[in-house]
């Protein structure tokens, strides 16, 4: 069966933050079996978005919280549901290249090359917007971030919604991005009309963001599409230095990158250094914290996981398989929350290739709390 439906909450009343609690309908859909029943459900989701409502849906990166990108009221609702600051612009999701052409001033040549190489996929491109895109969606900017996801549920939903879905990650602002529908339920049930549950997402980290509006293309957020991959298509590609250098006084060019982000509820410390020293340090600190009555979690790798003495030890995979680490990271942070972990330690990772995105998210999750041995 391609689709299965349940309603999460039936109460309609005001919640503490003044939002009306809605019936949030949850529908399971198999991305690889979008049958008539699933199509009908996605059609209803599309109608909700066209009518100004919100739907959480899977993409290949993380779950998105979608509303009509060309309707200012929908964008306001997205900010309210997430508790997101309204100067943090939303990414507009499209299903066809021609739909990009009608919301930007012009599509630069570089963009067409990127579409050919990486779309549909985990790459967001910033271009100059035209008057069709409301400032509510772009956080007041004259530029707009656009992506074509490859997830088939997402693409069908975009088509059924009229072509343009504004969608940030479907988490409460500041929490780790959701890689499973149940985390959208945790953060957003009662605040949005529908959640499409497409199972666990494939990539697990948000898209790479590249800016094409100011001279040399520049990466504003690292992701699965690496600088090396972009350079193979565009030639020279710069990286916003605030991504690499956390002590930089400059403001990040992607407004959202300045906020504390991806944070688990407990305190996370990244420990850098030779593997032996890292294991010894984390074990000593774990004992200290346990003696103080705290629950301790460790983010380890396959090779080291047996060596930690903390109460909960989770491996994010083998160091050789960066995609797996990216895939597991947010999930593990959420699991630590589920298990009420107070203090967490993580090994550090190489910061080349996808590692740049992994370390960027990990550093943010840790509030740049790093111990170098
Ligand atoms: P999220 O949708 O939660 O993955 O966050 C979207 C990210 O894209 C945030 O960091 C935004 O600041 C960034 N972004 C969206 N639109 C723009 C834009 N026009 N210029 C720069 N950054 C943007
Ligand atoms: Mg986000």
Image (tube, rainbow, N blue to C red):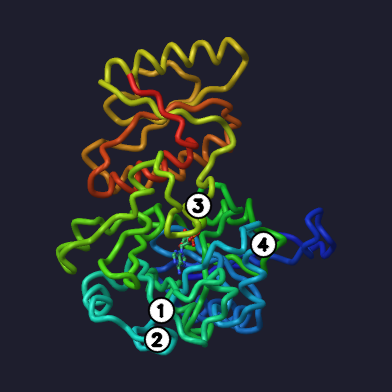
Select label 3 or label 2 by which is in front: 2
Looking at the image, do the residues carrying marks 1 and 2 touch, with CB atoms under 8 Å apart? Answer: yes
Q: State the separation of the CA atoms marked 4 and 3.
A: 14 Å
Of the two numbered discs 3 and 2 on the same chain, state the one appearing first in sequence. 2
Residue at image position (35%, 29%) is 347
To which residue does mark 1 refer? 128
Left-right relation of 3 to 185: left
Select label 4 or label 1 by which is in front: 1
To which residue does mark 4 refer? 81
In the rendered image of this protein, does residue 3 appear above or below residue 226? below
Left-right relation of 51 to 267: right
SS of the residue under disc 1? strand
Q: State the separation of the CA atoms marked 3 and 1.
A: 27 Å
Q: Is mark 4 within 8 Å of ligand 1?
A: no
Select label 3 or label 1 by which is in front: 1
Location of residue 246 in the rendering, given as x and y in whole percent from the top left corner: 40, 41
Residue at image position (34%, 54%) is 240
The quadrant of the image that shows the C terminus is top left
To which residue does mark 2 refer? 105
To which residue does mark 3 refer? 177
Location of residue 282 in the rendering, given as x and y in whole percent from the top left corner: 41, 18
Residue at image position (66%, 75%) is 53
Q: Nearer the viewer, residue 122 or 370?
A: 370
Q: State the separation of the CA atoms marked 4 and 1.
A: 27 Å
Of the two numbered discs 1 and 2 on the same chain, state the one appearing first in sequence. 2
Residue at image position (36%, 62%) is 209
């Amino acid at each position: 069966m391609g689709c299965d439906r349940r309603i999460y909450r039936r109460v309609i009343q005001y919640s503490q933050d003044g939002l009306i609690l809605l019936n949030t309908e949850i529908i399971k859909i198999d991305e690889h079996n979008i049958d008539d029943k699933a199509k009908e459900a996605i059609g209803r989701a599309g109608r909700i978005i066209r009518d100004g409502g919100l739907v959480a849906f899977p993409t290949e990166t993380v779950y998105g919280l979608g509303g009509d990108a060309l309707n200012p009221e929908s964008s306001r609702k997205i900010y309210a549901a997430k508790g997101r600051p309204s100067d943090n612009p939303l990414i507009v999701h499209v299903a066809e290249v021609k739909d990009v052409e009608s919301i930007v001033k012009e599509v630069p040549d570089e963009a067409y090359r990127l579409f050919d190489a990486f779309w549909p996929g985990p790459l967001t491109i910033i271009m100059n917007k035209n008057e069709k895109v409301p400032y509510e969606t772009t956080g007041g900017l004259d530029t707009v971030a656009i992506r074509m996801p490859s997830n088939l549920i997402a693409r069908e939903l975009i088509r059924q919604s009229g072509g343009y879905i504004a969608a940030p990650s479907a988490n409460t602002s500041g929490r780790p991005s959701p890689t499973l529908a149940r985390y959208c339920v945790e953060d957003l049930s009662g605040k949005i009309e529908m959640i499409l549950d497409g199972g666990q997402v494939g990539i697990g980290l948000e898209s790479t963001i590249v800016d094409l509006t100011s001279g040399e293309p520049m990466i504003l957020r690292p992701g699965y599409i690496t600088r090396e991959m972009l350079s193979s298509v565009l030639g020279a590609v710069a990286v916003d230095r605030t991504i690499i250098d956390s002590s930089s006084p400059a403001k990040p060019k992607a407004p959202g990158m300045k906020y504390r982000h991806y944070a688990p509820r407990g305190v996370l410390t990244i420990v850098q250094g030779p593997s032996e020293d890292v294991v010894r340090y984390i074990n000593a600190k774990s004992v200290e914290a346990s003696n103080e009555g705290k629950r301790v979690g460790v983010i380890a790798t396959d090779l080291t996981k047996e060596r930690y003495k903390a109460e909960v030890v989770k491996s994010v995979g083998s160091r050789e398989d960066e995609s797996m680490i990216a895939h597991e990271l947010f999930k593990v942070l959420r699991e630590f929350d589920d298990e009420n972990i107070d203090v967490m330690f993580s090994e550090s990772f190489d910061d080349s290739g996808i590692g740049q995105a992994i370390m960027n998210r990990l550093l943010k999750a840790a509030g740049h709390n790093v111990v170098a041995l």
